Amino acid sequence: MTHSHYDAEAHLPPHHNPLPELVEEERTREPSAEDFTRVQSSEEFVHLRKSFRSFAFPMTAVFLVWYFAYVLLSTYAESFMSTKVLGNLNLGLLLGLAQFASTFLITWLYVRHANKSLDPVAAKLRGELEGEI
């Protein structure tokens, strides 16, 4: 019994590489500690930090309250959580599924907020630090 080796890439050119070259972006200059200090005290950075915190902190608090409310209801309100809603679906199951839905909703809201309010300012500040602007 002979084994033949099939080369799935034999038809490709000799120097074919299916993955893109991983090359670090060249910086025009390396930022100094003074550059970081200057940017950190700039009005744009203060606005960036405030914009991030004004979204992240309240959203985190709301989600944690919602999460712990679910855990506490599951532990101490068994009769409430086992209330039938439709057929064998009860409130506990629906609220548990809502945990997943709220996680995806919060992620989507954050991505939308970051794309609109955070990323443009962060990219501008990074460009200034690296000498691109």
Image (cartoon, helix red, strand yellow):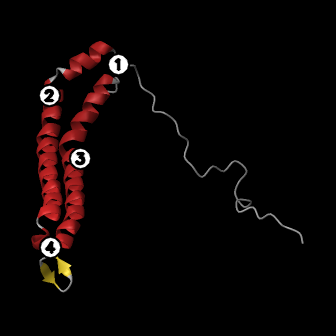
Residue 34 or residue 101, whichever sits in front:
101
Q: Amino acid at mark 4?
A: Leu
Q: CA distance from mark 1 to mark 3?
A: 25 Å
Q: CA distance from mark 4 to mark 1?
A: 55 Å
Mark drawn on residue 31: 1
CA separation, marks 2 and 4? 44 Å
Percent coordinates x, y for residue 79 in the rendering:
11, 73
First along the sequence among labels 2 and 3 = 2
Circle 4/circle 1 CB separation < 8 Å? no
Q: Mark 4 or mark 2, which is nearer the start of the sequence?
A: 2
Q: Mark on residue 91?
A: 4
Q: Position of residue 28 (x, y in %)?
A: 41, 23
Mark 1 Cα within 10 Å, few/some/many (few <14, many 20+)?
Answer: some
Q: Amino acid at mark 2?
A: Val
Quadrant location of the N terminus in the rendered image: bottom right
Side of 1 where 120 appears, left or right:
left
> Rounded to the nearest whole Å, what is the CA distance between mark 2 and mark 1?
19 Å
User: What is the three-letter code of the residue carrying label 3?
Assistant: Asn
Q: Earlier in the sequence, mark 2 or mark 1?
A: 1
Say which residue appears at 85% left-offset and 67% top-offset. Answer: 3
Give the left or right position of residue 14, taking residue 76 as reference. right
